[in-house]
Image: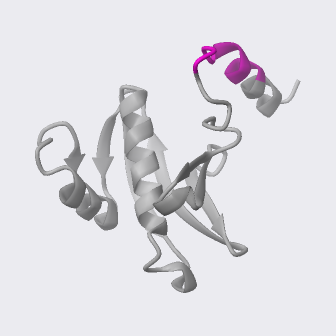
């Protein structure tokens, strides 16, 4: 059995009946204005991805036992200014929180996103410079 098959079986077995099937790692989660972006985790590449008009934007990460380091956001020039990077950052942070992981924002964009969207949550997330 391939690794991806094992993951699919594990995911299917672990979801409670109340979870919407559209909100899975396999199918992705729609985020952004009018839920126009589908963000997917690509664990083999250690990055989140969303495809818009045939172009892929990414947020690379390093997953550790108790934390996730958000390393770099890459958005093609033609997709900039449309909220794509915001959607990636939002998904990464919400997923880390759900999984009980500390977020370490090494990416300057993610650090700015956290400052813009969570001013009252100091101490829960950390940022670092590289």
Rendered location of residue 29, percent (x, y): 58, 45
| Dominant SS type (magenta) | helix
Task: Looking at the picture, tell me which residue is in the foreground, 14 or 42.
Answer: 14
The residue depicted at 19 percent of the width and 36 percent of the height is: 124
- Residue 11, magenta (yes or no): yes
- On-image quarter of the C terminus: bottom left
**Image quarter of residue 106:** bottom left
Left or right, residue 115 beside residue 81: left
The colour scheme used here is one colour
Number of numbered discs overlaid on the protein picture:
0
Identified at 67% across, 45% down, the residue is 44
Is residue 129 in view from this perspective?
A: no
Q: Is residue 1 visible?
A: yes
Question: For the view shown, which residue lies furthest in the front direction?
Answer: 34
Residue lying at 63% horizontally and 35% vertically, measured from the top left = 24
* Depth check, front residue: 123 or 60: 123
Residue 95's x, y, as percent? 45, 37
> Looking at the image, which residue is at 42% across and 34% down?
64
Q: Which residues are magenta?
A: 9-18
| Residue 120 position by quadrant | top left
- Please check the rendered image and state whether residue 68 is part of the magenta-colored stretch, yes or no: no
**78 w.r.t. 116: above or below:** below
Residue that protrudes farthest toward the bottom in the picture: 78
Residue 127 point in image, percent of width and height = 22, 52
The N terminus lies in quadrant: top right
Foreground residue among 16 and 68: 16
- Image location of residue 28, percent across then percent down: 64, 45
Q: Is residue 29 left or right of residue 61?
A: right
């Amino acid at each position: 059995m391939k690794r991806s098959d094992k993951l699919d079986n594990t995911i299917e077995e672990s979801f409670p009946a109340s979870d919407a099937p559209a909100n899975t790692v396999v199918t992705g989660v729609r985020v952004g204005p009018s839920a126009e972006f589908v963000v997917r985790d690509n664990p083999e590449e250690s990055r989140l991805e969303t495809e818009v008009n045939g172009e892929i934007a990414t947020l690379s990460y390093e997953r550790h036992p108790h934390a996730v380091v958000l390393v770099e956001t890459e958005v093609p020039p033609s997709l900039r200014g449309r909220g794509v990077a915001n959607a990636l950052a939002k998904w990464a942070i919400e997923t880390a929180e759900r999984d009980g992981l500390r977020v370490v924002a090494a990416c300057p964009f993610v650090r700015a996103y956290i400052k813009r969207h969570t001013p009252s949550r100091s101490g829960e997330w950390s940022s670092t410079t590289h």
